[in-house]
Image (cartoon, grey):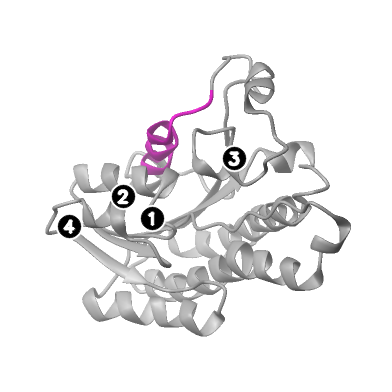
Amino acid sequence: MKTVLITGANSGIGFATVQLFLDNNYKVFAHYNQNRNSLESLDNKNLFLVKANLLYMNETEELFKEVMKETERIDVLVNNAGLYMSADTDKDLSIEAFDEVLNVNLKAPFILSKMFIHIMKNFSSGKIINISSIGVKYGGSYSSMFYTISKAALESLTLSLAKEGSKYNILVNAIRVGVTDTDIHKINKNKNMNDRVELIPLRRMAETKEIAEQILFLSSSKNSFMTGSIVTVAGGE
């Protein structure tokens, strides 16, 4: 049975990905920070919940250790957890806030990827999928620039990891996710989602399962060659 760690797994894309991987007979380690209500609703013997606050590097490292207590290998790492902040004023665009976003969206994926690549090398096999954002393509907005900057850096990290991983048959890719029907949009109260959807040629947001299907493909044996790719999953944006 193959194993996967999915970060930010209690809601949105992460939760849909947990469900899909369980349906495809993976042993799933589902990371959460505080809320685990959705994950607890899943009755599956192959689901293991692991708690960590990815704001703190020591907890990120502990997450790795907790997973490795339960398995000798991880076949797939999905770096999905993300911190989104929308600044109402220039004062909200603080260095402290910037550091927090970078810790969760960039440093945590780096730490986990580095640690799991070390394990994956022993088996000459592995997949890492980083979840980016369509905002990188357009530059995002001034109020959410920290999020966009962190995702742009995550894409760059993807390319660097892919070069190292390719020597050991470890495939590393990123998905640049288009506008998806998740609660993240509620954080920015100034965003009119009806207007935003009108900019999408398909005239609708993506469903979380549609993104999860792409994650599953990149994680599966059907992807035996693609690495170092930034895959845009969007409705024509």
- Between circles 1 and 4, the one closer to the viewer is 1
User: At label 3, which amino acid type do we have?
Assistant: His
Q: Position of residue 8 (x, y in %)?
A: 44, 58
Secondary structure that dominates the magenta span: helix
Q: Which residue has dot 1 on it?
A: 9
Q: Position of residue 196 (x, y in %)?
A: 67, 25
Q: Is residue 24 visible?
A: no
User: At label 2, which amino acid type do we have?
Assistant: Val
Q: Which residue has dot 4 on it?
A: 1
* Disc 4: CA contacts within 10 A as few (<14), some (14-19) or many (>=20): few
- Between circles 4 and 2, the one closer to the viewer is 2
Q: Which residue has dot 2 on it?
A: 18
Q: What separation in Å lies between label 3 and label 2 (alpha carbons)?
A: 21 Å
- Asked whether disc 2 touches disc 1, contact meaning CB atoms under 8 Å apart, the reply is yes
Q: What separation in Å lies between label 3 and label 4 (alpha carbons)?
A: 36 Å
| Disc 1 secondary structure class | loop
Residue at image x 47%, y 81%?
Answer: 59
Residue stretch in magenta? 205-217
User: At label 4, which amino acid type do we have?
Assistant: Met
Q: Which residue has dot 3 on it?
A: 185
Q: Which circle's residue, 3 or 4, is located before the other in the chain?
A: 4
- Between circles 3 and 1, the one closer to the viewer is 3
Residue at image x 57%, y 73%?
Answer: 55
